[in-house]
Image (cartoon, grey):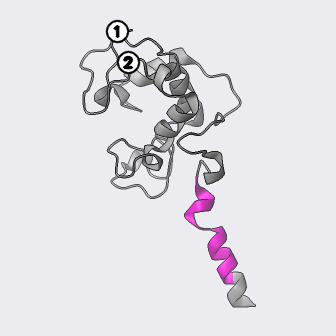
């Protein structure tokens, strides 16, 4: 009986139980429902995108017409991304793009387990809060025009 109890406790304490997003929240290549019940702020999402601390999005991606110097070109251009991907698809890509493309270079911004080379400042906590993820998704979803 002790052995069975020990096995159950071990399973209950696996990394699966400490995930910020559970597998049942993921549907195909998206997280259809918002991570929080608050209203997302696209303006704050744009601020997060261009900030050179926190998400660092602008270091790898570029958006035509965005007022930010030295936009990156390591990741794909995100001009018009809101017309190509749903909010749920964008949400999963920000949360943990490795769920869509294993071994991708883009970091997981809302994951705390199975990470490598994590700065001490981020150890055990996500880079972005759930609210920040939703704000970023709102901003990216607003980018509907391919040239603006």
Judging depth in this view, the residue of 79 and 83 nearest the camera is 83
Q: Which residues are magenta?
A: 6-19
In the picture provided, is 72 more to the left or to the right than 88?
A: left
- Residue 90's place in the image compared with 96, above or below, is above
Q: Quadrant of residue 30 in the image?
A: top right
Judging depth in this view, the residue of 67 and 124 nearest the camera is 67
Tell me where residue 41 appears, x and y as whole percent. 58, 19
Judging depth in this view, the residue of 7 and 85 nearest the camera is 85
Tell me where residue 106 appears, x and y as whole percent. 36, 41
SS of the residue under disc 1: loop
Tell me where residue 57 appears, x and y as whole percent. 37, 29
Q: Quadrant of residue 72 in the image?
A: top left
Q: Quadrant of residue 42 in the image?
A: top right
Q: Are marks 1 and 2 in contact (CB under 8 Å)?
A: yes
Q: Residue at x 39, y 52 (%)?
A: 102
SS of the residue under disc 2: loop
Magenta: main secondary structure equals helix
Q: Residues within 10 Å of mark 2 (few under 14, many from 20)?
A: many
Q: Residue at x 44, y 11 (%)?
A: 145
Q: Residue at x 71, y 30 (%)?
A: 37
Dot 1 corresponds to which residue? 65
């Amino acid at each position: 009986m002790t052995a069975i109890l020990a096995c159950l406790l071990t399973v209950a304490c696996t990394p699966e139980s400490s995930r910020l997003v559970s597998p049942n929240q993921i549907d195909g290549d998206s997280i259809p429902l918002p991570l929080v019940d608050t209203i997302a702020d696209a303006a704050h999402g744009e601020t997060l995108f261009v900030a050179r601390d926190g998400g660092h999005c602008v270091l790898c991606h570029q958006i035509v017409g965005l007022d930010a110097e030295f936009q990156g070109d390591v990741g794909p251009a995100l001009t018009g991304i809101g017309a190509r991907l749903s909010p749920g698809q964008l949400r999963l890509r920000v949360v943990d793009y490795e769920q869509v493309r294993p071994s991708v270079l883009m970091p997981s911004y809302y994951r705390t387990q199975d990470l490598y080379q994590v700065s001490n400042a981020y150890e055990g906590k996500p880079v972005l809060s759930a609210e920040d993820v939703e704000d970023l998704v709102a901003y990216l979803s607003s980018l509907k025009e391919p040239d603006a």
